[in-house]
Image (tube, grey):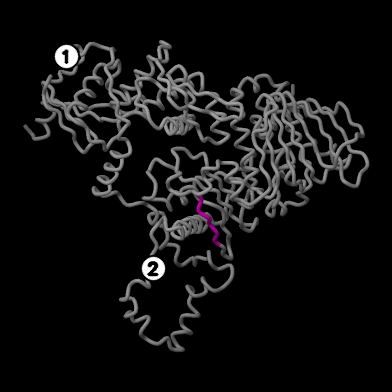
């Protein structure tokens, strides 16, 4: 018997939908991009239950005829591609011809559309890729498309969706990406009847501030570089607004949002020595390049693209960011006019005669800078010289003086972070017996990071930050499981200035934060305020503590194996731990050592990837000297 058979269209459509529509945010992206391509000036997004119950996009674009409205739900139906060469000249957003067909395969869809020249519009109702109803209807010009009960016919896929708060964050992320690319259009987002975004048409800077927060208004540096190969424009954040996560990083190529670790490396390279190593800069950059130089049809979501010449794009982006930083007096720039010795160089003193002019004009270097479309040209003969071009971007190792400066700054910055307390995990005598720490022996701090504690058969070298993280981690963990947190009321509530995405995340974490001792209230106008903090933490700058906690939580978010509560406990332990580079007193060191060996798991950091201390025994030390 033959065993190979063609799949039914309904199953094939559902399989294709799995590539394009992975979650409600995927559908939001496709529908918003279609509205932009339709020439709309006003686009409204309405969601219920984070898109699981309803996703509706209403636009005032050109609308569709009755035939186009029906064909738009067929697979491989598109108005943007007629021949294969068109794939390499795409200037619009959606073009794959599978978005609406995929949505119709996994949701109940209603479409109302009308062109301005038509008296009546078209109403279409589709369920499970089958047209249930199609009829004329009264409608304003433009298009309104609703998709209800996402994955209603694929319950296994629906079970894999995250909580409403998590899915809403993804929707907000996709909404911001599209809205950022088109600041001249009006966008709004309404969730469960409450307007989350109301973005009036305006300049790019206004759109960035509206979407990412008013606190960025004075923290943005404009960037604009134009060449015959690529135009780069947008904004970069000053070093002080760098974050622990990559959240506020946007690269658009021909107005299409992309993800590129390669270009991100170029931008981060321009910020070397301006921000801490673990921080990421904020940027919103737009790259305009000939569509023929870019292949955008390499991924179903079209967020990963290929450049014809990645190396030159890398160099242009890095140079543009460095130039913008220098223009804003953030990074040092060279001014040769300040050095009088330059005037004595032969190149300035000697005349530039006719023969030398002709020789220079015929050189490849001169052509590279004067002829159009040659700025990126590299001769094949010189390729061998560029094999190790990446080495140019490798940062040099920090010298000891810079480390000392960083240590001093950290000491100043975290002056109020250090708070030790007595804990009741194991008896102190048992801990000392296990590790044989000599009681009362003097302790030594090494490199403002390590504590050297004498033991009976050698010594123990303790990493002060990792050790304190372990101490705080076990304390917070016990507090959460015992529901025994004691909160201290603040005299004046501290208002939080958060972006919409961070507000959504914070609302999801409120119950777990309350278990630890943070009480945060939400007002009627969607403003969050800290009213109480854990009693055993030092007061002061509560808003900064919550903002940092949210950043670290997003950093931990890739660790799917951890629960939400576990991530919060880890974040708090890392945030409040004494940092490497902090000078400790003898009393603080002794307290830290005693508390560490009272922990249930004293030898590992909370992540389990690093030790908190290393033992050096006598026989090992003797071996180092060949004894």
Q: Name the residue under label 2.
A: 335
On the image, the x and y values in percent for residue 563 come to 48, 20
> In the figure, 474 relative to 496: above or below?
above
Q: Which of the 4 image quadrants contains residue 107?
A: top right
Of labels 1 and 2, earlier in sequence is 2
For the point 68% across and 19% down, the residue is 155
Q: How many labels does the image show?
A: 2
**Magenta residues: mostly which secondary structure?**
strand
Which residue, as the protein is rendered here, is positioned at the far front? 491
Q: What stretch is highlighted in magenta?
A: 220-225
Mark 1 Cα shell of 10 Å, populated few (<14), some (14-19), many (≥20)? few
**Quarter of the rendering containing residue 594:** top left
Q: Which residue is drawn at 31% across and 32% down?
A: 416
Q: Does the magenta stretch include residue 472?
A: no
Q: Distance between the Cα atoms at labels 1 and 2?
A: 65 Å
Circle 2 SS class: loop
Measured as percent of width and height from the top left, residue 17 is found at 70, 31
Write down the residue under mark 1.
433
Q: Quadrant of the N terminus?
A: top right
- In the rendered image, residue 593, in percent from the top left (x then y), is placed at 21, 23
Above or below: residue 532 compared with residue 427: below
Q: Quadrant of residue 224?
A: bottom right
Please state if 53 lies on the left or on the right of 432 as rendered.
Answer: right
Q: Which residue lies furthest to the bottom in this view?
A: 354
Determine crowd level at label 2: few under 14, some 14-19, many 20+ residues with C-alpha closer than 10 A: few
Q: Which numbered circle lies on residue 472? A: none
Could you say where residue 183 lies in the image, as x and y percent from the top left? 65, 48
Q: Horizontal placement of 315 versus 36: left or right?
A: left
Q: Nearer the viewer, residue 593 or 609?
A: 593
């Amino acid at each position: 018997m033959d065993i190979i058979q063609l799949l039914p269209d309904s199953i094939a459509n559902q399989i294709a939908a799995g590539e394009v529509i992975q979650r409600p945010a995927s559908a939001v992206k496709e529908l918003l991009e279609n509205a932009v391509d339709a020439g709309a000036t006003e686009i409204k997004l309405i969601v219920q239950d984070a898109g699981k119950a309803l996703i509706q996009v209403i636009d005032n674009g050109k609308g569709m005829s009755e035939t186009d409205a029906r064909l738009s739900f067929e697979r491989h139906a598109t108005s943007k591609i007629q021949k294969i060469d068109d794939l390499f000249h795409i200037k619009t957003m959606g073009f794959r011809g599978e978005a609406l067909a995929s949505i119709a395969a996994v949701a109940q869809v209603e479409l109302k559309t009308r062109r301005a020249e038509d008296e009546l519009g078209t109403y279409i109702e589709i369920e499970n890729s089958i047209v249930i109803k199609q009829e004329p209807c009264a409608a304003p010009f433009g298009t309104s498309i609703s998709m209800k009960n996402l994955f209603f016919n694929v319950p296994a896929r629906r079970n894999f969706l995250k909580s409403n708060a998590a899915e809403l964050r993804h929707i907000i992320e996709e909404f911001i990406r599209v809205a950022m690319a088109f600041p001249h259009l009006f966008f709004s987002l309404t969730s469960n009847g409450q307007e989350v975004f109301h973005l009036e048409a305006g300049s790019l800077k206004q759109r960035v501030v509206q979407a990412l927060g008013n606190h960025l208004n004075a923290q943005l540096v404009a960037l604009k570089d134009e060449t015959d190969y690529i135009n780069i424009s947008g904004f970069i954040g000053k070093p002080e607004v760098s974050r622990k996560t990559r959240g506020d990083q946007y690269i658009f190529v021909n107005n299409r949002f992309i993800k590129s670790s390669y270009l991100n490396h170029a931008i981060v390279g321009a910020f070397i020595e301006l921000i801490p190593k673990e921080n990421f800069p904020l940027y919103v950059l737009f790259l305009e390049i000939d569509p023929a130089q870019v292949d955008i049809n390499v991924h179903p979501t079209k967020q990963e693209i290929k450049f014809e010449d990645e190396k030159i794009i890398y160099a242009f982006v890095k140079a543009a960011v460095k130039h913008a930083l220098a223009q804003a007096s953030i990074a040092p720039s060279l001014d040769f006019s300040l050095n009088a010795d330059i005037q004595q160089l032969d190149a300035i003193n000697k005349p530039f005669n006719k023969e030398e002019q002709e020789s220079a004009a015929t050189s490849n270097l001169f052509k590279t800078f004067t002829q159009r479309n040659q700025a990126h040209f590299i001769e094949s003969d010189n390729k061998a010289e560029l094999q190790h071009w990446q080495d140019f971007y490798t940062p040099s190792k920090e010298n000891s003086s810079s480390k000392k400066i960083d240590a001093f700054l950290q000491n100043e910055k975290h002056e109020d972070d250090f708070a030790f307390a007595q804990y009741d995990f194991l008896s102190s005598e048992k801990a000392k017996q296990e590790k044989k720490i000599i009681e009362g022996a003097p302790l030594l701090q090494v490199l403002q990071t390590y504590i050297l504690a004498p033991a009976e058969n050698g010594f123990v070298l303790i990493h002060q930050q990792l050790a304190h993280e372990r101490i705080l981690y076990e304390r917070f963990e016990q507090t959460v499981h015992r529901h025994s947190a004691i909160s201290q009321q603040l005299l004046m509530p501290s208002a939080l200035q958060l972006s919409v995405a961070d507000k959504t995340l914070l609302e999801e974490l409120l119950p777990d934060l309350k278990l630890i001792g943070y009480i945060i209230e939400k007002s009627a106008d969607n403003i969050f305020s800290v009213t109480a903090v854990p009693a055993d933490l030092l007061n002061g700058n509560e808003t900064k503590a919550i903002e940092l906690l949210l950043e670290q939580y997003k950093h931990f978010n890739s660790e799917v194996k951890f629960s939400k509560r576990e991530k919060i406990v880890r974040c708090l332990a890392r945030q409040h731990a004494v940092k490497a580079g902090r000078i400790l007193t003898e009393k603080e060191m002794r307290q830290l050592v005693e508390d560490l060996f009272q922990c249930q798991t004293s030898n590992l950091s909370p992540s389990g990837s690093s030790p908190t201390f290393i033992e050096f025994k006598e026989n090992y030390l003797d071996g180092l000297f060949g004894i």
